[in-house]
Image (tube, coloured by chain):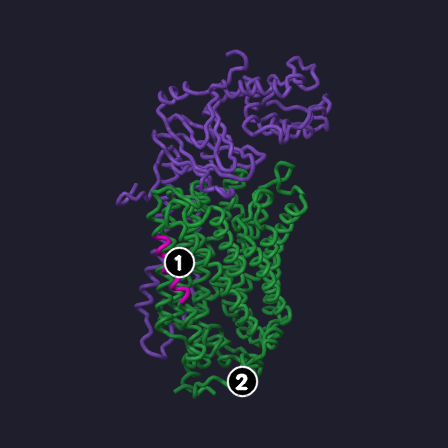
Amino acid sequence: MLDTLKIPEQHYLHDGHSLRSWLLTKDHKRIAIMYLMSISVMFFIGGLFAVGIRFELATPQGDFVTADTYNKFFTMHGVIMVFFFLIPSIPAVLGNFLIPPMIGAKDLAFPRLNLLSLYIYWFGSIFTIAAMVRGGVDTGWTFYTPYSASASNTHVVPTALGIFIAGFSSILTGLNFIVTIHRMRAPGMTWFRLPLFVWAHYATSLIQVLGTPVVAITIVMLFVERAFGFAIFDPQRGGDPVLFQHLFWFYSHPAVYIMILPAMGVMSELVSTFSRKRIFGYSFVAFSSLAIAVFGFIVWAHHMFVSGISTYAAMVFSFLSFSVAIPSAVKTFNWSATLYKGAVSFETPMLYAYGFLGLFAIGGLTGLFLATLGVDVHMHDTYFVVAHFHYIMVGGAIMGYLGGLHYWWPKMTGRMYSEFFSRVSAITVFVGFNVTFFPQFVVGYLGMPRRYHAYPDEMQVLNVMSSAGATVLGLGYVLPVIYFLYSLKHGRVAGPNPWGASGLEWQMQSPPLTENFTEAPQVIHEPYEYEHIVVAKEKHLV
Amino acid sequence: MSIFGIPIFPDQASTFARDVDALYFFILAVCAFFALAVAVPVIYFGIRYHKTHDRQIGARIEGNLPLELLWSVIPTIIAMVMFGWGVSVFYHLRRPPAEALHLYAVGKQWMWKFQHMEGQREINELHIPSGRPIKITVTSEDVLHSLYFPAFRTKYDAIPGRYTELWFEAQKPGSYHIFCTEYCGTNHSGMIGTVTVLEPAAYQEWLQGGGLEGTLAQRGARLFNDLACSSCHVDSGRGRGPSLKDIVGTTVELRDGSSATIDDAYLRESILNSQAKVVKGFEPLMPTFQGLISEENLVALIEYVKSMSPKATTTAPAAPPAGKK
């Protein structure tokens, strides 16, 4: 099997070809592939709205679309990207595909629940897309009251219900991962032999399970106020509009860690594999994931320093926000130190890992400005914030996602993509991203508020740079679609372990069998040991 | 500051601007340091330890506890410096001095309405003197807005149903942007204006030009009569409502046995939702004015009530009681 490098006859993609065999599958890998296709569609829909935004902002006047249309563009860009792309991205695709094999299991603990989560995600997406087709929503992805509750006459309720529904998909995925990681580990797979990708997903799942119900409750409250006229947030009738912000950010700040923690998990795998070396400070990297998940829950009001919370509450939340910076810094330093005395090579996934390090470092460091009270007053709700969170959520999370996709693509499909074009794409994304978002830090400190359809003339040059960069970035995102699809038929056969990586998933054939392993693997090695991989390679591959 | 005529740094037009920018540059320096502390080793290791042959693997290094402590503790210390410095700037920013010149801003989809104590009213325009602290009480008629002066490095949300405040001391005469920074619907990006900072003498001259309706408190006094407040709230205290003389800043006992301190928020609530906190000894007879009075008239009315407590209201300039013009 290993010598000739052919795609094996039997694998999960050949286990039935009918639509029914896909739609009723319980295989975590097939569910992951369906998630991959679904979120890719959502990513490009969300991307189209970004194209509209950058077109409009190329000139200071509001001349490309009307103000109402523009407001819908940025709202739907945010809603789709956050709730229907970033939150499911790495967990539902890569986590779903890889957590069972990484721990030596045949599937997740609850395969049917896993399929249900996909159906729920589809149902939620359909709700939200239907709301868009019927005219869209203009509240911003944050749905701040009282605007969303009483003033906006767009399709707030169906959009919010779509998010409410999709939330259950996220809860079920998280629940499934927690149980799987606790109960399904192969013999010898102790907690401290778990790949750091699994640790990161464990931390992420905790947030999904504990945080998502809060946003569900918040949406129900908004629904009750909008549909039945209860005054929960309406100040005219004794409601409190600021209450919404507390509830919303109690979920939506931890949600940022739902997006970035899995990307950090991918990073640990990439950095270790492509320096062929055990990750530096394994337990610090593992526990920093948990620390981020826990601290992430107690920093929400840093979104509200000028929203009418007391001066002293602002101080407490500023302090706590700094506390979440430390575990992120610890991770970054450990990844850097892993390279020391490694055997470093720069295949495409490693280019993405380097890109992640650069962009996440800038994104994380610029968060320090916003956690600092005296400076945040000036920066709050300006383009500085927009730039900061895109560096984390696009620069961090999407670089991690793409890096992971390029890394595990040969495992998922059995074939390699074009090395040349994938490198071009990685570099294009990195350059395009920086040209798009770095000027936004500058224009933000100048004072340009976010969600502005028109802006003062003197800010045009920086905005034109942004729009130009976005064009390059868009190209970088389209390229992988082409060479990935091309590779499915024409790609070089990858073999089980093309990178010489150490994880259990690389002991499966590529693409894997439906049951992953023919017999349950016995784990005898520490994680990220490369000595025996080299030996194994020499034995089987000439 | 600008490069090739393109502005890249905002005007420093208030006393805060220096404080905020100093902290900003400190954090920028820290960020540059840490960015290099990651970038330099990562790039160097990538080159120095580049894989040379296929079977090569990295050295077996598990980790290093002193290093872990070092890169946890040093960032923590630096973060605490940022935190402390940030708090001190913020605390200053959130505490208007007692002698500040007081004015009101009301946000409404999609305009800013400013009211001066002397009676001038402006829309999307604001004239203020330089070299003097200005305190702005902010509220909204409809949805959330946020009053933002980038050149002064300050902003605060306008929240319907509540008064919030911000203050600054403008230093450099000139014209600067006013933005709304809380998304508020269709014309959010049109909810902008210009603040004009005038030399004190020029400001005095500007003040002479307007205020046709008298001072804000005088306008409030007329409303006090028009809305028939005066028929119950008589000075003797024997009316159907309590006397409003010298009440601001005092604590009163309520019908339900609790007590309340009389401030802007109490006055606002007692006008809009008159049954909420009725003073002991009086019947809950007052009609509510929710929806019947605009935010601008409400602040005029409150200013008039406050002018009846000259000892408690030290904000300058003290509004003269109505009718003495």
The image shows residue A524 at horizontal and vertical percentages of 52, 78
Distance of mark 1 from mark 2, alpha carbons?
41 Å
Q: Is tag 1's residue or tag 2's residue first in the polypeptide sequence?
A: 2
Range of the magenta residues? A465-478
Instruction: Say if labels 1 and 2 share a chain.
Output: yes
Q: Residue furthest top?
A: B324
Amino acid beneath label 2? Gln
Find numbered disc 2 in the image and state the secondary structure of the residue it sits on.
loop
**Chain B takes which shade in the image?**
purple
- Residue depicted at 45% across the width and 58% down the height: A48
Q: Which residue lies under the disc numbered 2?
A: A10
**Chain A takes which shade in the image?**
green
Is residue A521 visible to the viewer in this orientation of the structure?
A: no
- Residue depicted at 34% across the width and 52% down the height: A465
Q: Which residue lies under the disc numbered 1?
A: A359
Q: Chain of mark 2?
A: A
